Image (cartoon, rainbow, N blue to C red):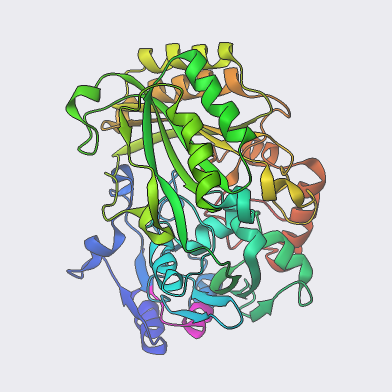
Amino acid sequence: MTNHSSLHALAKDLTGEVIEPAQPSFDSHKTAFYDEYNDRTPQAIVRVADAADVRRVIGYARDTGSGLAVRAGGHSVLGHSSPDGGLLLDLSGLAAIDVDPERATAWAGGGVLAGDYTRATGEHGLATGFGDTPSVGVSGITLGGGVGFLHRKLGLTIDSLLAAEIVTADGETRVIDAENDPDLFWAIRGGGGNFGVLTRMKFRLHPIDAVVGGMMILPATPELVTEFVAASQEASDDLSVIAGVAVAPPLPFLPAEVHGQLIVMGFMVHAGDLATAEREVGRFRSMATPLVDGVQPMSYPEIYGDEEPPHPAAMSVRSVFSDGFTVEDAGAAIDALTSSTADMSVLQMRVLGGAVSRVSDDATAFGHRSRAMILNVAAAYQDPGSRPEHETWVSDLSNRLASGTPGAAYLNFLGDDSPDAVRAAFPQSTWEQLVDVKTKYDQDNLFSSNHNIPPRI
């Protein structure tokens, strides 16, 4: 039951605003990235304006026992940022970006989106590496690690995080870094949103201006897919590739003659010299005549393009690590993709190595630095009622392709938030350390709408 009087009292204390279900703007503000979560209704949406607002909201949730979910970009595959009941703490108002080109650093508010940050820093020929979608929240991708278009050259997003302002469950605002609350700073770099609300982040900026990047689509065979992975692994650290194998759907950016074909769709960024870029990208072009070839010189912010990809109604996802990818693996994936009944199914491959692997596993809560690649198996569909069928398909293929430690997964793409799945996503020593930090800073598990790490009882 909504306590209107206490919500009104909260609203009076805020610089931001409280939006309740009866207000006309409520539905537009609660809209989720995935349509299947739009039938969820939070008790109220609190659009905060600063860290002081966040403190007040946390205090309200703690004192009243209200559930609390936090939204930046809102891309949670499992709807963690789309609660049914409780408070939705909306960070979109924390959108300030303060670029210091002389010191090559930038402070970003907790609600900043990756595309906005990249455009702002790109005006100075500088960049921090995030993911592959401009509308992803910078805070969310950072908390999970951050694998994108520059990870082989610059490392994960968390490897460029210098400091953070965070409001913890006790209502304290802390500025943390390697010297101040180092245990908490370690935990937020890969441990998810278990420890507080990020209100500002300080990132290192890197001189990334002109790159060779874009999308290349080739016809998919088991042999070509295997060679595509090998070329991504053997290239210099300047090249990061995100590749997807799929039956080409009738998407507007795909030529009509490609629809229905098995394809490899590679998004590439080469942030090195032009001659090396042309040689390394040329290896992909030589595998087969490209069906689409948009890889060309551009400024780095242009890699995000001008249009947001379509939002699926529902999505089933599994993330696994692999240390070897064979022709047999590629053949199994192609067979599975052609048998899927989802509107769109894909095997996405993110080759690691490079700067990612040059940081020790225990330096941050992302504990899988030595793994060769992340494989994401995903099915998108319009009818949420068909989820069991697609969950089975996703699980079967991801289990077939996984190698190494059972259950190990990249948190930002973990499509299962059961306690066993979350536990298995981390190495044992990392998990134990995360539980210690959780117990210290959030003993009552106020921050539980996430891939939850429970405190020690």
Vertical placement of residue 108 versus 239, above or below: below
Q: Residue at x 50, y 74 (%)?
A: 108
Q: Nearer the viewer, residue 320 or 392?
A: 320
x and y percentages locating residue 455 in the rendered image = 72, 56
Q: Main secondary structure of the magenta part?
A: helix
x and y percentages locating residue 303 in the rendered image = 39, 53
Please give left or right for residue 105 compared with residue 393 in the image.
Answer: right
x and y percentages locating residue 101 in the rendered image = 54, 80
Vertical placement of residue 273 versus 334, above or below: below
Please give left or right for residue 261 compared with residue 109 in the image.
Answer: left
x and y percentages locating residue 219 in the rendered image = 37, 20
Q: Quadrant of residue 404?
A: top right
Q: Nearer the viewer, residue 80 or 184?
A: 184
Q: Nearer the viewer, residue 112 or 254?
A: 254
Q: Quadrant of residue 30?
A: bottom left
Q: Residue at x 80, y 49 (%)?
A: 432
Q: Quadrant of residue 35?
A: top left
Q: Is residue 86 magenta?
A: no
In magenta, the rendered stretch is 47-56
| Residue that protrudes farthest toward the front in the picture | 275
Q: Residue at x 66, y 80 (%)?
A: 175
Residue 84 appears in the picture as rendered: no
Residue 366 appears in the picture as rendered: yes
Please give left or right for residue 1 compared with residue 429 in the image.
Answer: left
Image quadrant where one finds the C terminus: bottom right
Q: Is residue 50 magenta?
A: yes
Please give left or right for residue 148 compared with residue 154 in the image.
Answer: left
